[in-house]
Image: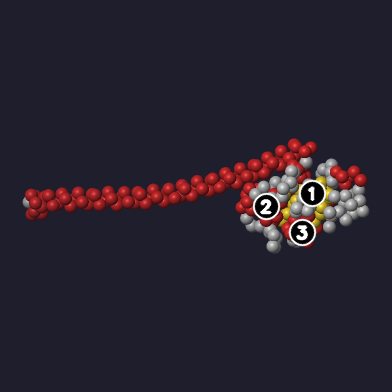
Amino acid sequence: MGAGGEGKAAAAAVRVLVVDDSPVDRKVVELLLRNHKGGAAPFHVTAVDSGKKAMELLGPKGQGRLDSSAADANELTVDIVLTDYCMPEMTGYDLLKAIKALSSPNPIPVVVMSSENEPQRISSRCLTAGAEDFILKPLKSKDVQRLRNCSNSAKPKGADDAHQCKSLSSRRKITSEQRSQITRLAMVLNASSIELSHYFQFLFKFILLAYAVLCLGELLHRWSNGSFLSLWSS
């Protein structure tokens, strides 16, 4: 599982709980985070293979703390949860809602990752439920700093990074909302164009019918006056 640091480095580490049912993906994330050199604080990674096991660490007994089996036996605070979206039994979305439902003065930031075919829909759904960010799998080096920024949203000293992460989430939410509004507008315009098309067809038929009635009336009028027969005989 996770590997703890020593001394001051361990105290300053960003503690990440990785939740993914794929052992390959878990190992990729662990190696990427532990080998990342882009920040002052290293990453301390604890990985589990299900949302249920994650909640055993984060539930009412844990409340965001991991039991340490190391010799120092110090409790390790969870700075951020990185979870896969598609998992059996308890999905990443279910885990996100369960974590947000925990009564804690400092809510644990959650970042959701996925390799699904509909990232926009999943991203909008997770951000609306309270996720700090959404990342496409596989995790890349450029995504690590996003995790670091989001993890600081639970720390009082990380106000600038927290603001940056919240702003990113807000922009993503706004983009999703704008996309939905554009989609609804396109549907309304499409429906309106169909209604206008039916209206013009009806109007054209009505004009033709009115013209035919006028012509028939004129013929009947001439017939009654005898002018129609005179025109025919001439």
Q: Which residue is mark 3?
A: 53
Q: Amino acid at mark 1?
A: Val
Q: Amino acid at mark 2?
A: Lys
Q: Residues within 10 Å of mark 1 (few under 14, many from 20)?
A: many
Q: Is residue 111 left or right of residue 9?
A: left
First of labels 2, 1 by sequence position: 1
Q: Residues within 10 Å of mark 2 (few under 14, many from 20)?
A: some
Q: x and y percent of residue 39 in the render?
A: 82, 43
SS of the residue under disc 3: helix
Q: Which residue is mark 2?
A: 97
Give how far apart the Cα atoms at labels 2 and 1 are.
Answer: 17 Å
SS of the residue under disc 2: helix
Q: Which mark is residue 170?
A: none
**In percent of the image, x 51 and y 48: which residue is there?**
184
**In percent of the image, x 69 and y 50: which residue is there?**
101
**In percent of the image, x 61 and y 43: which residue is there?**
174
Determine the image quadrant of residue 178: top right
Give how far apart the Cα atoms at labels 3 and 2 are.
Answer: 15 Å
Give the colour scheme shown.
Answer: secondary structure
Q: x and y percent of residue 171 in the render?
A: 64, 42
Q: Which residue is mark 1?
A: 78
Q: Is residue 179 left or right of residue 22?
A: left
As rendered, which of 7 and 181 lies closer to the eye? Answer: 7
Give how far apart the Cα atoms at labels 1 and 3 are.
Answer: 14 Å
Question: Can you see residue 233?
Answer: yes
**In percent of the image, x 69 and y 49: which residue is there?**
100
Q: Is residue 103 left or right of residue 212?
A: right
